[in-house]
Amino acid sequence: LVPDEKWNLSPAVLKTLQRRLLFERDNPLSLLKQRIVSFMYSKFQVKGGLSPMFAVVDNQPRVVSVFENFDSLLVPWDHVSRSDLDTYYVNKDHCLRAHTSAHQHSLIKQGLDNFLVIGDVYRRDAIDRTHFPCFHQVEGVRLFTATELFGDPDKLAILQKTLLTNGLRTAEGQEQHAGDVTQLLTKDLKETLENLCGHIFGSEHKLRWVSAEFPFTHPSFELEMYYDNKWMEVLGCGVIEQNLLKMAGIVDRVGWAFGLGLERLAMILYEIPDIRLFWSRDSGFLSQFAGKSPNDDIKYVPVSVHPQILYDLSFWLPEGISPEAMVAETYDLIRSLGGELIEQVKVTDTYMHPKTMRRSQTYRLVYRSHSGTLTKEDVNPIHSLIREKLVESFGVTLR
């Protein structure tokens, strides 16, 4: 692949591409992945119970086509996720996958009816304890023939094996789904995911379903769990858009899909306070998960808590760059130069000069190490380099 003017991969992102956390045995994300796979294997067996129904696909390319990442999922042309402020582009036709759903079209086209796609995905995002430019997802897809969905031969005769029709689209279902197709798919989907949530977190937590909107499913839902005195999103899911299946050559099946973020769930399950810890090579962290079984009850014990060092950074924006683009570029530059010492970056102030009409931004940078106490003498060279590179790379005027 030849980069062009769309290329926006930062050094920090290129560095993360060199690691595969899900294949590192002692990483908690690997343990959670195995817990989810074991549940799907045990719940879904092919007829006769001799082998699992779901295929596990966990080594797909991280660089995908724009068609795979967006068009094959019916993402509108003007959707914000297509922006180079949200997505990492290699060139105008290729990008780093922003979700494991990017492989859905090709796998269905290859003939897979039931599968899990698991892997690392990339988005230009905020910098804080719960966000990182790379995170990990599990995508689940199940397709049904009429026989598999309706089951009862008598009902099949009544419905004449009809899955599809030409009707009207409503808030409850798609225009192409006949009879009680949507209700049966939704029932199976929700039961599966409620059981999965119980398998991961235990059955003592309250669950609720919330309506959602995604371009690739309708109806769409989010599953929330009541945890630590608040409702928390666990995953998103829905009935696969029939036009998406048609694009992959499927005309005699319907299905559901779900997607979940492993970091979000692992931070709750193992009580890990900072997303950067998943990338740590520190033995004090990894040793707590070494040799553990996926179903073991593990709670992370902080090795030590070191103080933060706070710095503010202010500058006037150069002409020709939007405030939103400047924020995205600044986040990437800070992450690339500050590495794992950057705990959080937040825009704390924006200002427009009433006479010159120039814009100013102020950022609060939080430095903290998990391995030792930082001093200002440790941080000053890094912070100075960030200031210099902002001037050199974007022509900002420091304040």
Image: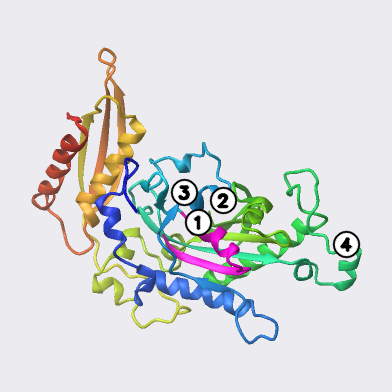
The colour scheme is rainbow
Lower position in the chain sequence, tag 1 or tag 4 = 1
Write down the residue under mark 4.
Answer: 159
Q: Is residue 221 visible?
A: yes
Please count the marks in the image: 4
Q: Which residues are drawn in magenta? A: 99-120
- Along the line of sight, which residue is nearer the eye, 164 or 249? 249
The residue wearing badge 3 is 66
Q: Residue furthest top?
A: 355
Distance between the alpha carbons at the discs numbered 3 and 2: 10 Å
Q: Residues within 10 Å of mark 2 (few under 14, many from 20)?
A: many
Check if mark 2's residue and mark 1's residue have beta carbons within 8 Å.
yes
Looking at this view, name the residue that lies furthest to the left: 377
| Amino acid found under the numbered disc labelled 3 | Val
Q: Residue at x 29, y 71 (%)?
A: 285
Residue 307, by quadrant, is: bottom left
Distance between mark 2 and mark 1 Cα atoms: 8 Å
